[in-house]
Image (cartoon, grey):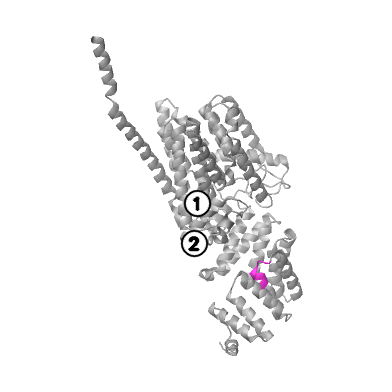
Amino acid sequence: MGKKNKLKGQKSEASQPARPLKKEVVNKKFSDYWVLGVVLVVTAICFWPMLNNQFTNWDDEFYVVQNQLLRGPDWEGIFSKPVVSNYHPLTVATLAYNYQVSELDPSSYLTLNLLLHLANTALVFFLVWKLSDRKVWVAFFTALLFGIHPMHVESVAWVSERKDVLYTLFFLLGIFQYLRYADTKKSINYWACFLLFGLSLLSKPAAIVFPVLLLLFDYWKGLPLNRKSIIEKIPFFIFAAIFAVITVKIQSNTAIAGTDQYPLWARLFFGCYTVMFYFVKFFVPFSLSAFYPYPSPDNLGLPVLLSPLFIVALLAALWYFRKNKLIIFGLLFFIINLLLVLQVVSIGGTIVSERYTYVPYIGLAFLAAMLLSKLRNDSIKKTVFVSSCIVVAVFGIITNKRVEVWKDSTSLWTDAISKHPEAPVPRTNRANHFIKLSAEPAYAAQKDALLKQALEDCTIALQYKPNHAKGYENRQNIYLRLRDYHGAAADAGALIKLEPGNRSGYYTRGTAFVQLNKPDSALADFNKSLSLSMNDDYTLSQRGSLLFNIYNRYDEAITDFTNAININPKGQYFLFRSYSYYRKGDLVNAKKDAAIAIQKGEAIAADYRQYLGL
């Protein structure tokens, strides 16, 4: 009887906590969401100034301002044509959505970038929460580091880097589905993972490394590497290989830089340097820049030459801690996500780029948070906690200030020049921006000052790098605007020698030759420019004017003006064609074109209007 009562008592005790336990779980979930809310609010505050930023002249012109695919939008073109040497149709589709919302007002583009970054920050929180066996403070610290790290500003505050925040969204969602598949073996999770992987690839080719990461997550979960686990990843590797081939084919002539300037051994050193640079900047994100130039081929510099020692130390650490799953996982996550941007095959014009750390830093942040959580000594824990709070605060301040650097092209390139005054690209990019500003009515009073600053930037750039084609391309245009036609012709000639296929050299020199009274040379240059591309209304108009004014070849002039109108129906082109019709005695078409020119706001001489009866 006593034994029965004892058993009954045990049963009743076990059943008692049922309700409080349920309440405790609810409260725990609420607490987790509250902590996540803090992360998102802090991240949003750090990035908030970006919502007032403008487009920059670093790829934003090609992705948005001049991108005709966004108008309409042209869905067939979006999914069939590369943009800026990349095939990422989903990214372009989201930009097309923004264009429908705000056209060329950058506010909606930047707002969506920030929202995607906040979504990614939340996904990092939940991913780490799952990987760390629901350690909420590990998830908090990792997500906060990811959200406010200064090296991530480039990926978020730069409109053209929409591809970073978008591909990461699908990338992380795909990892979630794979982890669920690893737990349940349900085919729906497997195919959901594959679909999300595809969407990530369609947002940015960097997602190619996804299948390798799946193997890393198997390692983290303690799953065996056997025939079955490899076979189930074959579709991912095949899809990744297809996109790799597409990407190399698209980028081979543009984004992938030539390898003849640096020997193979130097490029291997670059690979070591990039890993070291990104690792160090995770802990010390200071002296950041939108542009990091390659070193001189004659002097790679000590950081590059000593970087293999860092790689040796990193490999030694991986070997020493080979049985420590946490360290191996965190470091390999970081390294795997950098494999495509190690610059052994040079991509782009910079040796390193801050945007390449957007996903890799998840591994380092997770590793740091987990190591901190394992501290046992209370006094050390307090010291580390206070130090971590200070670090996070400093990172947040740097990020907040760094966002303002991306305000516009002037602030962006001025900052880059202050960090790398010898680099020609930031100077010519700023010069290009000043040239365009000088042509705007709002900057009429500052026109000369802007052109002089642009001229100085180009001249300094060419002093550092005499074969910098962009320096000549910009300076020739400055000389034209300053009416220095000899200078314009000389720089155009230098550009033609460097880049014989660059049509801007020919039409600029042709324009200068017109002013220098060298019509035959001008006509030859215009012909050459149009042989390279007929889709240039300016050159067609210039050649038409030359044929009209000097050679009296009115039929050919009419053809050129007509082609220019088909490309860009400016009132000036209609007026020029009207003059050509008039010289031919075709008053009907002359009057028709003149009327259109007037409707488009073109000023027409009173006697010509009177003669046509307008």
Q: Which mark is residue 304?
A: none
* Residue at horizontal 60 percent and vertical 61 percent from the top: 431
Residue 67 shows in this picture: no
Q: Amino acid at mark 1?
A: Ala
Residue 372 placement (x, y as % from top left)? 45, 31
Q: SS of the residue at dot 2?
A: loop
Identify the image quadrant of residue 602. bottom right
| Crowd tier of the residue under label 1, counting other residues whose Cα lies within 10 Å: few below 14, some 14–19, many 20 or above | many
Q: Which mark is residue 103?
A: 2
Seen in the image, is 526 located left or right of residue 198? right
Q: SS of the residue at dot 1?
A: helix
Seen in the image, is 336 located left or right of residue 506? left
The segment highlighted magenta reads: 534-540
Q: Is residue 569 above or below residue 194?
A: below
Q: Amino acid at mark 2?
A: Glu
Residue 611 shows in this picture: yes
Nearer the observer: mark 1 or 2; the answer is 2
Q: Is residue 131 above or below residue 50?
A: above
* Residue at horizontal 60 percent and vertical 70 percent from the top: 568
* Residue at horizontal 58 percent and vertical 83 percent from the top: 604
First in residue order: circle 1 vs circle 2: 2
Quadrant of the frame with the C terminus: bottom right
Residue 581 placement (x, y as % from top left)? 66, 83
Check the image and name the residue furthest to the front. 187
Q: Is residue 485 above or below residue 470?
A: below
- Does the magenta run of residues contain 83? no
Quadrant of the frame with the N terminus: top left
Residue 421 placement (x, y as % from top left)? 61, 53
* Residue corresponding to mark 1: 157
- Using the image as rendered, state which of residue 266 and residue 239 is in the foreground: 239
